[in-house]
Image (cartoon, rainbow, N blue to C red):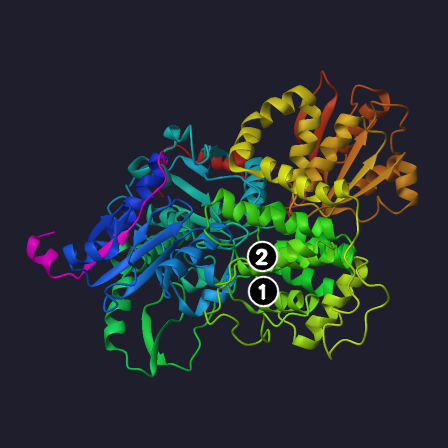
Amino acid sequence: MSDDQLQGRPHMLFFRRVKPGLAPFLSQHLDDQIRVLGHFYDVKIISRDCDYAQECELFEPEITVFESGVYSYNQRIRNTNAHAEIPKLGFLHSDAYDLARAVFISKMAEWGIETFFTTSTSMAEYTPEIAQNLFVWPNSIDPHTFRDFGLAKNIPVLVTGSQERHYPWRNAVNRALAERFPTMTMPHFGWGNGTERLVVGTDYAKLLSASYFVPACGSMAREVVRKQLEIPAAGACLVTERSTRLEAFGFSDMVNCVFADQANVVEKLDDLWRDQDRLKGIITEGHNLVHSHHADANRSQVREWLELYRQRTPGQKIIQETPCSSLTLVDKSASAPILVGPGLDRVQLTDGWRLLRSHMLDDAEREFLKCLNYYFIPEAIPGLVFTSLAKGDAHAALGWATQALKRSMQDTGAIDPDPVLWACRIRALICAGEVSAAISSAKRYPHLKHIELDRVRLAVSELLSSTDYASPDVPIYGWEPRPSIAPVPVLDLHAWKQEFEQFLASCGQFESSPGEAGSGFQIRRSFRAKRLPLLQQLFPAAKRSFAGLLDSGTIVRLRMALSPLKQLLVGTAWSRRIKETVGRERLSRAIVIGRLDGTDRRALEWGRSLNPWLPLLDFSDSFSQADARGLLRGGGRYVLLLADFQLGPLIAPDAAEISKLAGFGLVLIRGTTTPDGYRTFSGLLESRCFTVVAHDPSKGTAVLRQSGLVDHGRATRPAADSDMAANTDGRSE
């Protein structure tokens, strides 16, 4: 760009300090963002501790941007209240579900920033308390890098990206495709050491260009990620999960992409493979959509904000209709729409709170734990705290709250806590009878205000007969409310008091039944703190301190590094197979027939604890017993059968029982080298309902997957494998 063009753009000061040692491909992503901003601004990066007033005087910016997020390193910026005439924006660089959001909100409060941008299209759904001040600056593609290179297409299906648990669609679809199509897999290598082996930039774009189908998804949050734009831009067919956000970006099933799931992806791709003209049309339409609407030059939202900020009147506000649309001015009374996915974990959170408020505590706890099995979702923590208190286990509640606070403050560096998570800690301390600790916690961080924290503080003040706190529905300290990343469903004050009293009663903190709720908390006169021996008083705090040490960042990283060694030392190849299968497959139930040794049982339970769907476990001594209990009837693609013939007698299922196993999605067998185990294994294969996924004849173990899940009445042969192989000879359609 010429000097004249550069001079014509507004000056932007961008405060960004990244963590040292960032992987090269991540550093490239950060550089790409600055390059995109360079279309619209003359950008100067400040990556050190500094004085805001001095930097503004030197550079004379027309706008300043402050980044905080998952890649940010603690940057100290003084005097951010200077130069109030210069508009300030916060840039939230984080996944929508990450704890880095708490650090961001804390930093923005410290720096006095109230308007934010993010690349995450689902952030407003996941962090609703900042949604009205949040705009999306979506990901985009560099059209010079991601283009159709005209290469011969010799990769039928290309699998790339992370296979972690928070990508359930990707994991399920990739497994289905790998069993039925010639597939090339590119390992992800994580986000740290080893990433130098990643194929990136132009080489990655050429790999996409040489592929027919490339599946990608936006995690359980149903995000729109960079990969979903890069694939069609490079001339491959995007295979992805349907979402309202992708549709808002202009994607349409069988027009410019393929929307599919585990049940129909093979059939849809098989149909397109047989109709090459239609496949070529979808690839062309996808390429044109991205290059015309989602290239770098289209991402003008941050520049639009500055222009509208200058134009708006006192009665107007700026909103964004969809995550990829331009910004507009509307009447100040209007609300910005929030495009809901919904994220899979958001559905489970909603179900969890509904079940909790219906007093179905075990079911509620299960839904909240499902969320944590995707990732550490902080929004699940208040639900687990409330569920534990309703069950009368105040110390479990305190453990959940402490874990979340340590992760957000100690490991990510927030200078003050999330207000709702802090309120959960105080609530749990009260219910545990740790009154002095509750009082001390209530008095800390007096600048924090949130309706949930204000109400809990009022409860503490009533315990002391104190007038330190005002009504919980009006400002206490005069500060603005602090947004929370983990809000709880708001109850009216009467219902809130009633629920709090029920928790106190469940935890044994009433001499008698709680009084009539509504006239007051009824806590002051009826609350009784636990009187415990000194050692017992000290033990919970010591236990939490030790647990906090184990959860510290350094220890967690050490445990992660040693985890593969631990698995090798204490497990077997079969137990690791059990853990991996039960932990990653989408399962509603796992049925175990026969005895499991301790290692396999632990692997089963460990895998179950990691599974986002938390499958139920059923145990039977024999196939006949399982059949009598109705466990063999119905089956289902999300049900797993684990049969162990190795320990003790286990009679092979008869022909009728074998036929009932056809409905199971997965069957794991240990003991195929025993007569009954072999008869079961061969009987399942003869049924032609299963495909062998893994088999170790020497050790007598096998994993079978139901082969008819994706055929919908077709023959159960592999979908067009031979046809596909014949068409991978270098043709470029």
Whether residue 288 appears in magenta in the rendering, the answer is: no
The C terminus - image quarter: top left
Secondary structure state at the residue bearing disc 2: helix
Residue projecting furthest to the top? 698
Q: Residue at x 67, y 51 (%)?
A: 398
User: Relative to 247, is 348 on the left or the right?
Assistant: right
Q: Estimate the spatial distance between the alpha carbons at disc 1 and disc 2, rounded to whole Å.
A: 7 Å
Give 88 or 224, whichever is nearer the viewer: 88
Mark closer to the chain start, 1 or 2? 2
Secondary structure state at the residue bearing disc 1: helix
Give the image location of residue 344, x and y in percent: 59, 56
Q: Looking at the picture, does residue 716 appear above or below residue 341?
A: above
The number of callouts visible is 2
Give the image location of residue 495, x and y in percent: 71, 74
Tag of residue 422: 2
User: Relative to 649, is 400 on the left or the right?
Assistant: left
Whether residue 13 appears in magenta in the rendering, the answer is: yes
- Label 1 Cα crowd, 10 Å radius (few <14 / some 14-19 / many 20+): many
Say whether residue 253 is visible. yes
Q: Looking at the picture, does residue 670 appear above or below residue 358?
A: above
Give, as a single range, the part of the protein colored magenta: 1-22
Q: Write down the residue under mark 1.
A: 453
Q: Residue at x 76, y 59 (%)?
A: 390
Q: Residue at x 75, y 56 (%)?
A: 363
Circle 1/circle 2 CB separation < 8 Å: yes
Say whether residue 348 is visible. no
